């Protein structure tokens, strides 16, 4: 595995060629770092699942450089999905649509749908453009962490997660800290009305306002993604994450800046607002592990806007979630 710390136009060209020839390339996006592989290459995808330690029935997101390529991968695209794409792409939103024949079972977990995203990070977008210019159609990029673990938001975290699993010719591109810090909003566009399958920084309110509809509370917080299987934990550090718990001596502590650190606790993050909360959360969870902490007490933000997405990730990271997770249907 090679880490490329300063990406130029020519290194991106080489990285795209490497992707096309069957290697894996981890790269930054505005949400989190992704582990890229050629979406049309069955052997590459099999390897990618192994590197991540992810069950193969768990589908991947195809990344493309522009919405012009959408109809290569998706069919029967509803008007509201086009509107979402025109407004929020390139950006931190993934659309689930009915698939074309290009989207094979080995990336969709044998579902009839495919998830597509156009990232806005300039390095990611340039890499995809180069990849498409040499005959590629799309790059799958699951978050570049081992299955069930915390998504990486910088190249050091990718190395920490995957260096033992990547091969000699695989690459990690460094593009600094991911701006948003939590994964994209996933919107299911396979029926008459959209459903939010995973909340993110494109918020429920933003989707509702744009489309002038109400997405029912029932759909949004439950976030059931149609994937087989059920899982215990997601986005989990080694330390136990406890929401709103009582802090003991030596526990980690994450809360908005305005909430004072309880006596004896180790402050891991003091975000000033919810955007900074999302931006710093995964680093704070990793910091707890690097300090060898056993427990992290987290005071979640209110559930409005991006707060909904933060609460969702925190619930999945915490043990309180175990019952919900057993009946829940997604994990990354
Ligand atoms: O922000 C992101 O989306 C990042 C960056 C790297 O782009 N990627 C990411 O990928 O979070 P991953 O693989 O860690 O999470 C993909 C999620 C999973 O929860 C998966 O179940 C869901 O997307 N998904 C993929 N295809 C789907 C489909 N056809 N139907 C429903 N959900 C799908
Ligand atoms: Mg993931």
Image (cartoon, helix red, strand yellow):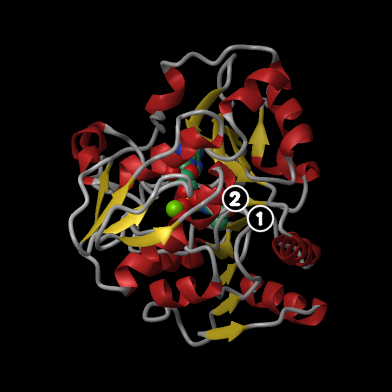
The relative height of residue 264 versus residue 228 in the rendered view (above or below) is below
Indicate whether 15 appears above or below 210.
Answer: below
Residue 199 appears left or right of 262: right
Kindly identify the residue that appears in the image at 42 percent across and 80 percent down: 163
- Residue nearest the viewer, comparing 97 with 255: 255
Q: Which residue is mark 2?
A: 62
Earlier in the chain: of badge 1 and badge 2, it is 2
Residue 282 location, quadrant:
bottom left
Label 2 Cα neighbours within 10 Å, binned few <14 / some 14-19 / many ≥20: many
Q: Residues within 10 Å of mark 1 (few under 14, many from 20)?
A: many
Image label count = 2
Q: Are marks 1 and 2 in contact (CB under 8 Å)?
A: yes
Q: Which numbered tag is attached to residue 228? A: none
Q: CA distance from mark 1 to mark 2?
A: 6 Å
- Asked which secondary structure carries label 2, the reply is strand
Could you tell me which residue is drawn at 62 percent across and 75 percent down?
A: 173
In the depicted view, which residue is nearer to us: 167 or 111? 167
Q: Depth check: 165 or 211 in front?
A: 211
Residue at coordinates 59% horizontally, 31% vertically from top-left?
203
Q: Is residue 17 visible?
A: yes
Residue shown at 66%/27% (left/top)?
Answer: 206
Residue 242 image offset from top left, x and y in percent = 24, 47
Image quarter for residue 94? top right
- Placement of 105 over or under 3, stated as above or below: above
SS of the residue under disc 1: loop
Q: Nearer the viewer, residue 119 or 54?
A: 119
Q: Position of residue 205 (x, y in %)?
A: 61, 23
Q: Is residue 110 in view from this perspective?
A: no
Q: Quadrant of residue 93?
A: top right
On whether ligand 1 comes within 8 Å of the CB at mark 2, the answer is no
The disc placed on residue 138 is 1
Q: Where in the figure is residue 218, as x and y percent of width and height?
A: 41, 16
């Amino acid at each position: 595995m090679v880490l490329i710390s300063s990406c130029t136009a020519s290194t991106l060209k080489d990285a795209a060629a490497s992707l096309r020839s069957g290697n894996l390339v981890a790269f930054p996006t505005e949400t989190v770092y992704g582990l890229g592989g050629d979406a049309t290459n069955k052997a590459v995808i099999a390897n990618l699942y192994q590197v991540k330690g992810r069950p193969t029935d768990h589908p991947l997101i195809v990344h493309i450089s522009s919405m012009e390529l959408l109809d290569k991968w998706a069919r029967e695209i509803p008007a509201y999905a086009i509107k979402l794409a025109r407004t929020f792409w390139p950006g931190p939103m993934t659309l689930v649509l009915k698939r074309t024949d290009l989207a094979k079972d080995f990336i969709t977990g044998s579902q009839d749908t495919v998830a597509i995203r156009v990232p806005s990070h300039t390095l990611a977008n340039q890499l995809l453009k180069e990849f498409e210019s040499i005959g590629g159609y799309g790059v799958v990029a699951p978050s570049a962490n081992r299955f069930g673990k915390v998504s990486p938001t910088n190249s050091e975290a990718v190395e920490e997660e995957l260096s033992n699993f990547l091969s000699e010719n695989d690459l990690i591109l460094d593009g600094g800290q991911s701006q948003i810090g939590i994964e994209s909003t996933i919107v299911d566009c396979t029926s008459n009305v959209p459903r939010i399958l995973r909340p993110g920084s494109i918020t429920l309110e933003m989707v509702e306002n744009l489309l002038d509809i109400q997405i029912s509370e029932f759909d949004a917080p439950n976030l059931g993604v149609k994937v087989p299987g059920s899982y215990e934990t997601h986005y989990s550090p080694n330390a136990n994450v406890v929401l709103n718990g009582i802090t003991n001596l030596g526990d980690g502590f994450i809360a908005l800046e305005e909430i004072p650190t309880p006596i004896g606790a180790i402050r891991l993050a003091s975000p000033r607002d919810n955007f900074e909360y999302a931006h710093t959360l995964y680093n704070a969870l990793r910091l707890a592990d690097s300090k060898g902490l056993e427990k992290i007490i987290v005071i979640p933000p209110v559930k409005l806007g991006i707060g909904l997405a933060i609460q969702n990730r925190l619930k999945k990271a915490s043990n309180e979630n175990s019952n919900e997770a057993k009946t829940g249907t997604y994990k990354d």
